[in-house]
Amino acid sequence: MLAESLFFSAVLFTVGVVGVLTRRNAIIIFMCVELMLNAVNLSFVAFAQVYGASGQVFVFFVMTVAAAEAAVGLAIIIALFRHRHTVNLSNINLLKG
Amino acid sequence: MMLLPHEAMLAASQLAAPAAHPLDGTVAGYVWLLPLLPLLGFLANGLLSVTSAAHFGPADPGAGHGPAHPSSPAPHAPSDHGAAGDDHHAVARHRHASLVSLIGPGVLVVAFGLALAIFFAMQGAGEMKAPFIQRYFSWMPVGDLNIDVAFQLDQLSMLMVLIITGVGMLILLFSVGYMRDDPGYPRYFAYLNLFVFFMLVLVLGSSYPLMFIGWEGVGLCSYLLIGFWFSEKANADAGKKAFIVNRIGDFGFLVAMFMMFANFGALDFTGVAAGASQLGLGSVLVTAICLFLFLGCAGKSAQIPLYVWLPDAMAGPTPVSALIHAATMVTAGVYLIARSNILFSLAPVACLVVVLIGALTAIFAASIGLKQWDIKKVLAYSTVSQLGYMFMGVGSGAYAAGMFHLMTHAFFKALLFLGSGSVIYAMHAAYHHTGSHDDAQDMRNMGGMRKYMPITWGLMWIATLAISGIPPFAGFFSKDEILGAVHARHAGSTLDGASLLGVPGGAIMMFCYVLGLAAAFMTAVYMTRMMLYTFHGPNRTGDRERDHLHEAPWIMTGPLVVLGALSAVGGWFNLPSFFPAGRVGALEHWLDPVVGDGALRFTNGAPVEVPASTEYLLVGIAIAIAVAGIALAFVRLKPATLVPKTDAPAEHGFERVLANKYFVDEIYDATIVEPVVATSRGLLWRGIDVGLIDGFTRLLIQSKDDDSAPGSSVQMGGLLTRAVGLVGSTLQSGRVGTYAWVLVVGMLFVLGAFTFR
Amino acid sequence: MPHNNLQLFYVANFYLFGLIAIASAVAFVTRKSPVSAALWLVSTMSALAAMYVMLDAPFIGVMQVLVYAGAIMVVFLFVIMLLNLGHPSEIADARGIWWKLAGGLVGLALLAQIFALTRARLPEALVLPENTVADQIVRTGAIAPLAGPLFHEYLLAFEVTSVLLLAAVVGAVVLGKRKDRDYAR
């Protein structure tokens, strides 16, 4: 089922990318990133079935990184909201030098 | 080329699984502790130095220790003012001084004890053909290149470890007295400990890259310690000079390593030796590698043409000169050649170059030493000259003889330097007492020190007789062995078969032998001259200062006594066969598993057989020359007629050439330094920087930009950059959405590059 | 997957949950309200958890439910609620129609390229015999095949992730802390 898994993984990943491109709500964009991570996890697990369980270890690490990312990212969003009273990215251009 | 049994075994041990080694499970397993101890000492002392810096302020020797020497206008004025028995400027001793003096030499005492334990373990282990290699971790696993951090313990590295930790321990103990009142006391010991760490890495590393780490590390420490009193520009300049000259040599070392890896696919000693053994005698590749390695040696071990840094290195504290610039670091080149003996034994032409350069350096430096007035400069040129002897030894395939001279030289030269340090210490204390600013290192200001420093006087004479080659002192045996080896190989060896620039090798070896004899004669003369002017005759220090001259404290004379004993009996470690008593060739036998095969190859597999009559003749010539040199010095030199430095007349003729070191520094300055500076200043700075780049931007921007006045070309130089930056900054809108788009489109391009390949 | 009569069941379920995952994902990116979008994402993640089970990774499936669908998504919902992101200006967050079209085109191009890339040959030499992982699970349980490499080969990485988590916790606290001037406002 490797090929099928990779197909599903690719579709999910693309959906995540399109979400990041078309949405402006910071939280939703953030969730789209989580979706992309999940899509990659799916291909890791699929490869693990063929090449050995090490792939599953990587899923573990991805989950850990995702958890850390969620904690910091959401804290940033809260700080942002407190500052600007919006999470709409078209109103936010703080990343300018 | 036949495969010698040792190499065959090496090759076999590469293929087979690591066999049990006789040293497995002994104290030798703690070899990692040897470099670790000085490293810990460095960290501790460095920490003490850093933490207390805030309370002390930057070390400023200028304030506490005297003043530049107004009487010596030369740019490289010798200035060793560590010895400050000082009661005028109340220089407080460092807060942590007692702790530092415990840690600094302490770690070396422990390391020396450990080294001795390992040495006895090696003796107990009996016959040990293969090196004891301890792998710790993989350092550079890149493709075919796999370099481990591994320490190699064999007879050669053991000898070096014993010298480094033993002599280093004595010199550090001496430093406790010598440097006690210096504001940079912990910094000094931190550097010295770091030096010992790197030096041990150098000799214990099991591969050329690891050795190179130590090689560079000792260079760094040398630089730091030469410029220890960096607030005086001459000292800092001397440090820079040493550093830069050594880079030239390091270039050679690096190229040699690249060639080894490209051709042998290995960089550890066993791998390179196995790879080189596949090549024939005198192959161009091995010769090139050896010559590049020797370039590295010439830099580190101060051989022609790169020796110029070593005399200037005397700007550092005297114990540093003893440890780094006489006993250990500068001998690293000799160690490198002995370590690469398989390579060098395959390249007779390269060996001829080594012998020739060694002999030329020996006589060249010895002749300069004849007319130096600074006591440390005499010893510095003497060191250069003796290093030339060592290279004659290892170059002619007499590795044991070269290493033997390395060892004895470490003893007597450390003693000479420390003894001169005692003298300088006394002189400095006396001058400080009266506030005089005379040169504490100039022999014209000394004289008659025998009366004030009898112990130092006696010990220095032992060292002088040793270095001059008077039996039964240490230097006689080692120097005689080297000269004998050079003479023996002028016929019937691979060196004889080779030729250099059309000159047959046998003739070159004979020529080098004569040069070596002449250098030995000069050595006897200049060393006796130094002793006569320093310790004999009337005292010229000054009437008021004379009362304050006295022997150094026991912490300084103690190590001197030990070194004096070693200088006296050091020769017994490797007695020649004609000597009536004692064990013959102990050191040679000890080193045989490491260098024996390489040495045998020089004589086509047969041990050197010298007829007894020839041998007695050679020994007789050597002794006669040494005695003649000393006698000549006694007859011709009149310490009584010498006048202090300030009243001394200028030299004339060839004397002047010698006193100015053949003007080599000036020649280098005119041919290399000045053109480089002129090119940088005239072409690169005025031409390209100011003329081209700034002029171009001035044309572009002048109309637009009005806040920078025309003509201030420095400000305009960046305007082109600013214009480009303007385009970039408009792209950076700060909107995350735009960034995401750019990112994804870029990713499409990258993936596209894979898809439409 | 087990090589017994359940095979068909596994394959069917795999496809079923795959379709659910994709449908939920599409729903997730098209919802206007953050809350319903988050709930659709939970659905996607649960479907993925089921697919992991079909792919011989039951333990990862459990973790997926616990960590992702459970912990992480709860935090997301919590933040959405906390910031009260329901009001109209926040909901109308999508870009204009041209942006959407462009996004769709880019997505299609990306998909096409990924498919083109999966034609690349996989290293056959590394492929394990059929059902190795499934047999391992039967023999030693679901956790051992994962725990072995995790605590041996990847021990350093494992320890480093703990440092990463610590750093994330500290960072989150620092970022989320109210500053004094916030009170002053």
Image (spheres, coloured by chain):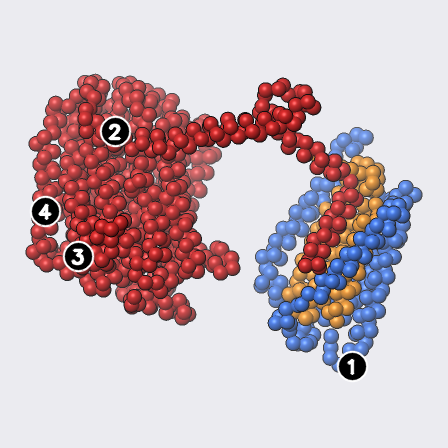
Chain colours: A orange, B red, C blue
In the rendered structure, the residue with mark 4 lies on which chain?
B
Residue B621 badge: 4
In the rendered structure, the residue with mark 2 lies on which chain?
B
Residue appearing at x 23%, y 42% in the figure: B360
Mark 2 residue type: Asn
Mark 3 Cα-neighbour bin, 10 Å: few <14, some 14–19, many ≥20: some
Question: x, y percentage for residue B468?
Answer: 16, 41
In the displayed structure, does residue A82 sit left or right of residue B81? Answer: right
CA–CA distance between discs 3 and 1? 90 Å
CA–CA distance between discs 2 and 3? 38 Å
- The residue to which callout 2 is attached is B660
Question: x, y percentage for residue B49?
Answer: 43, 35
Determine the secondary structure under disc 1: loop
3 vs 4, front mark:
3
Q: In which quarter of the image is the C terminus of chain C?
A: top right
Residue appearing at x 68%, y 22% in the figure: B703
Contact between labelled residues 3 and 2, with CB atoms less than 8 Å apart: no
Determine the secondary structure under disc 3: loop
- The residue to which callout 1 is attached is C5
Same chain for marks 3 and 4? yes
Same chain for marks 3 and 1? no
Residue B491 badge: 3
